[in-house]
Image (tube, coloured by chain):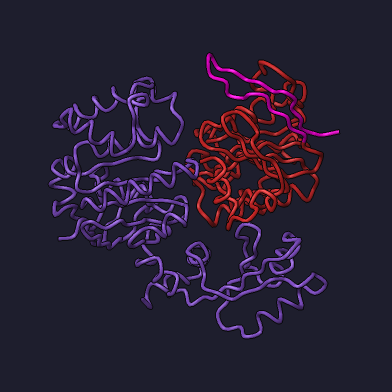
Chain colours: A purple, B red
Amino acid sequence: MNAISTRGLTRRFGDFTAVDGVALEVGSGEVFGLLGPNGAGKTTLIRLLCGLYVPNAGSATVLGLDIESERERIRSQIGYMSQSFSLYGELTVDENLRFYTGVYGGASAGRVQAVCEQLALDAEARRARVEDLPTGLRQRAALAAAVLHDPRLVFLDEPTSGVDPHARRSFWSLIAGLAQAGTTVLVTTHAMVEAELCDRVALMISGRLVAVGTPAELVARTGLQILEVDAQPWQSVYRRLKARWPDAALHGTRTHVPFRDDHEMQSTARELLGGLAAPAMRIGAPSLEDAFVWYAAGAGAGRADDAAGGA
Amino acid sequence: MPEIAARGLVKRFGKVQALRGIDLEIPAGALWGVVGADGAGKTTLLRCIAGLYRPDGGRVQPGIAGQLRLGFAQQGFHLYGELTVQENIAFIGAVYGLDRDLVGERAEELLAFAGLSAHRYRRAGSLSGGMKQKLTLACSLLHRPPILLLDEPTTGVDPLSRREFWELIEQLHLEGSTILLASAYFDEVERCERVIYLDRGRVIAEGTPEELRGAHPSLEAAFVEVTA
């Protein structure tokens, strides 16, 4: 049985269709990444699956339960960590956890202790008021609240937004730990380095899923290659290449130019950069970020639909 | 003379020392980045520079005396969700005491610059994360400040919108603005001319991205090692 299974799932707000005919299968124990531009409908989809919104059309099961008729039963078996972390700032971490235990029912003191140990929330952090904690610890406390009742499926909506690299890395090892213990994780993120850590990802644009697969499959499906140019001054390298190839983009200070069947790329680029001392160039596979931008930028032109249809 | 400067800057909140003696000189027209772990003091530093916090020790410039010379895009969304894009701009213009016709004129320019012209009548609260950040930037530019402070302007913004946002920053930099930017994204910080590492209220390193990266594969890897 899949942890999540949806068919034609649709949700409208007025004349705006936030989720548009989504068909999605997420396997048990998967770490599944939901990617997409701001406003693509990711949060609405999660809220539908949590039973917080009712669909206008289509159907879905979560852990084998129907999201409309069995929503109460779903809620006791899932965890949800929202973008804003949804803890009470004036309460301490312990007080928040006690409150959530009361809401969900059932977590023993031993379970609270075990979760706090697993998430590296020490006694000092647990005694602190949530609003006094740095973002990284607030985020871990929110995750603790979301998994206290030992849910079989957790939804994490942009859990690492605004969190520093240390906290981001340790958070992802916690996610891996949850998955190893058999919990299904559905996570949204804008950081493509994180998306690459997922078993599979779906790319959502304007309410529709335009591509689903492993990160490597999504990249391969674009059929793109990347000319990467690393030369100084990078600003003028970027501007010159961008003038010729509007899809050129910066990755750090290196310019990436996506292309498909241009055998003259390197020599054309070299001409464009004439006068610069030996620019370092290589042709390689696109990153997931290259692929994301390619799908997202081309959505209006039907590019993404082509790619999804050809899959 | 530097546009942004701090000497021995100290800021306390109760017993917590958020800034423990910051020295800093950023010349006019520069694009600098500041990075650090959560709670390192990035936002406090920007707020002191912007004059929103009074230092407990040392000096800072421009600070409160220079508020009209700087634009500050604060972290998160601080505009009025119930007002339209255009109404937000008009309101900020009124706060700065700008002439209404002048605000109208600049609003047109800024909406075009930020790619928001088609969305002027939308409620700001209904904009996507990327558009909100562009509106925040546009509002902070309304009084044409020569100095721009950006606090994590692309947090929660998707990769495509992030690229568009950086085109705007690059353009402002080319036009001569002095920009100090705090970010958690190291690929962005690599585009700054110089980078400051902040750790527990102190500057622990400062240099060009190349200098700070040293032998590490990326700036992020270097940062993780230095601050581990």
The answer to whether any part of residue A59 appears in the image is no
* Quadrant in which residue B32 is drawn: top right
Q: Residue furthest top?
A: B14
Q: Residue at x 39, y 25 (%)?
A: A130
- B215 vs A6, left or right, is right
- B140 vs B161, left or right, is right
Q: Residue at x 37, y 54 (%)?
A: A17
* Magenta highlight range: B1-25
- B147 vs B43, left or right, is right
Q: Nearer the viewer, residue A169 or A214?
A: A169
* B14 lies above or below B172: above
* Quadrant in which residue B100 is drawn: top right
- B170 vs A42, left or right, is right
* B50 lies above or below A75: above
Q: Residue A64: where, in percent of width, then height?
A: 14, 54
Q: Residue A133: where, in percent of width, then height?
A: 43, 27
Q: Residue furthest right?
A: B1
Q: Residue at x 51, y 48 (%)?
A: B157
Q: Nearer the viewer, residue A289 or B122?
A: A289
Q: Residue A3: where, in percent of width, then height?
A: 20, 56
* B74 lies above or below A261: above
Magenta region, main secondary structure: strand
Q: Residue at x 63, y 24 (%)?
A: B20
The answer to whether any part of residue A92 appears in the image is yes
Q: Residue A195: where, in percent of width, then height?
A: 41, 57
Which quadrant is the N terminus of chain B positioned in?
Answer: top right
Magenta run includes residue A243: no
Magenta run includes residue B2: yes
Picture mark count: 0
